[in-house]
Image (spheres, grey):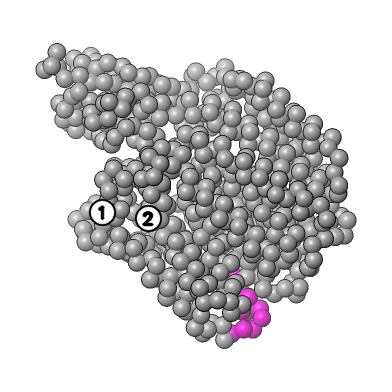
Amino acid sequence: MNNRDPYLNRYFPWLLLVGILLNIPGLWLDIIEPDGALYATIAKHIVLHNDWINLHGDGHDWLDKPHFPFWMAAISYKIFGITGFAYKLPAFLFWLLSLRYTYLIARDLHSEDVAKIAVLIYTVALHSTLANFDVRAEPYLTACIIGAAWHMLRVNARAHWSHIVWAALFAACAIMTKGIFVLITLGGGWVIYWLITRQFREFINYRWWLVLALCFVFILPELYSLYVQFDLHPEKVVFGRTNVSGLRFFFWDSQFGRFFNTGPIKGSGNVTFFLHTTLWAFLPWSVGLVGGIVYLLRFDKERNALRWVIYGSTLVTFVLFSLSKFQLPHYLVIEFPYFSMITAYFFVELARRSRLNHLVTVQTVLLVITLLFIAGLLYITRIENGLLAAGIALAIVVIANVVSYRNAMQQLLFKGYAMAAMLYIFLFQFFYPFLLQYQSGMQAARVIPEKNRDLPVAAYGSFSYSFEFYSPGEVKLIKNGEHLDDFIDDAPCYLYTTAAITDSLIRSGVDAEVQASPQHFHVTRLKYGFLDEKKRGAVVEPRYLLLIRDEDTL
């Protein structure tokens, strides 16, 4: 398919640059609790102890996630220091890599136009951008999956043998990020494609078996680390029991055990969760995605059967997520490159028929709704500089609607980016900085001076991952009063705790000086009572950082 839009080449690089720039401010914002701060702390432990095999988090040996994301963050710490920026940077670089591979797959299966539009869509899809701010495993996982997928397409095309190695390496990194279930995402589409096209010999093609064999070679560092940390130490208590095999957990309990809800970590889910979650997580392109899915099911069955490698992988992964008992919105991010290709292809097909106007209207409505949402939130919360935030949002809407567009595609994309710009400027410059004021652990940790980094630091009664990460050194998690007494005996020391425990310690004669008393709220579980400025005081509560002095030195 030849390039049909004479204007796309002109504005594509500039719009892509804007999209990338909209993602960058989140790198400099503090890490938000709980998962991001927990993962950052696990990587911090690697660097502080120079131990790249044993993962420790939440005060114990950590088995819940594989090593790869923690290794990447730890390498970044080694280069840039232990900071929030250093934690997020490697994930951001992997996200940039996923943009490149999204382009390559869409170009090879569709056209240059579809490839460029797919990249533009993916760059500012809501939960993709949020994943670059609240970094977990998804940026790594997405890049590794989409990278492996493109190299597998090249293997299928009998391209250079190096694609076999790259496909295996990316697949291995994906497995070392999330687990063995990744192979179902990567292989499910190929199985569907081979069955549809009756290419049954591909099931015994040596190339695919070589990719699989190399993949297992490349995950040996993960298997070795799990074996050393857990299988060699059956006495360790993990998930409340001993004799826990890290290898068994990796190959079965962490994936199949979760799916069938038979593993040590259990969950509950609803089969429709990801259907309605997609509608907001993929904004501002959700309506286009729904239309694109309907279009490909009705009209694209025979045009290029190889595309069903991607469509099949999308379907298999979505069904697995929906049937699983573990359901969180950020799981969907690994689907976003594929969602973007489906949506971009639909946009191009509608543009070819001059039928994009209805989607342009939808995009305009979404733009106005977003403005009203931001204005309402600013009115309720009374965020500092709220008038400035409202003025910026209004200016973006006005500009997006008065600009002269060359065609409907340009208008559709520009208004989508206007909505993204309005939303992400509001979130990263105004809303998240406001929320992070109430992440008390981080606020308390920053009071500890660097000169006191060697003093013992602990948390009791209230634990905060951000306190553990932002404290200069290590933080001990105290779980009972007896251990607290032992810790106080090592004074001078710092203690992060609640108001009730602070009062109790001071009344008992402990020489404790309050260093900080930040207000606390669980900022990732927002409630109206917190957002409403008039009611906020009733739902926040103080946390205390105490400097406990050594009485013998007085």
Identify the amino acid type marked 2. Answer: His
- Label 2 crowd bin: few (<14), some (14–19), many (20+), radius 10 Å: many
Nearest-to-viewer mark from 1 and 2: 2
Q: Residue 172, relative to residue 528: is it above or below?
A: below
Q: Secondary structure at mark 2?
A: loop
- Of 274 and 75, the residue lying toward us: 75
Quadrant where the C terminus lies? top left
Does the magenta portion include 360?
no
Report the span colored magenta: 189-200
Q: Residue 72, relative to residue 386: is it above or below?
A: below
Picture coordinates of residue 429 (x, y %)?
Answer: 59, 30
Picture coordinates of residue 197 (x, y %)?
Answer: 66, 81
- Of 242 and 513, the residue lying toward us: 513
Residue found at x 62% / y 44%: 20
Magenta span dominant secondary structure: helix
Residue found at x 49% / y 68%: 166
- Label 1 crowd bin: few (<14), some (14–19), many (20+), radius 10 Å: few
Q: Which residue is mark 2?
A: 67
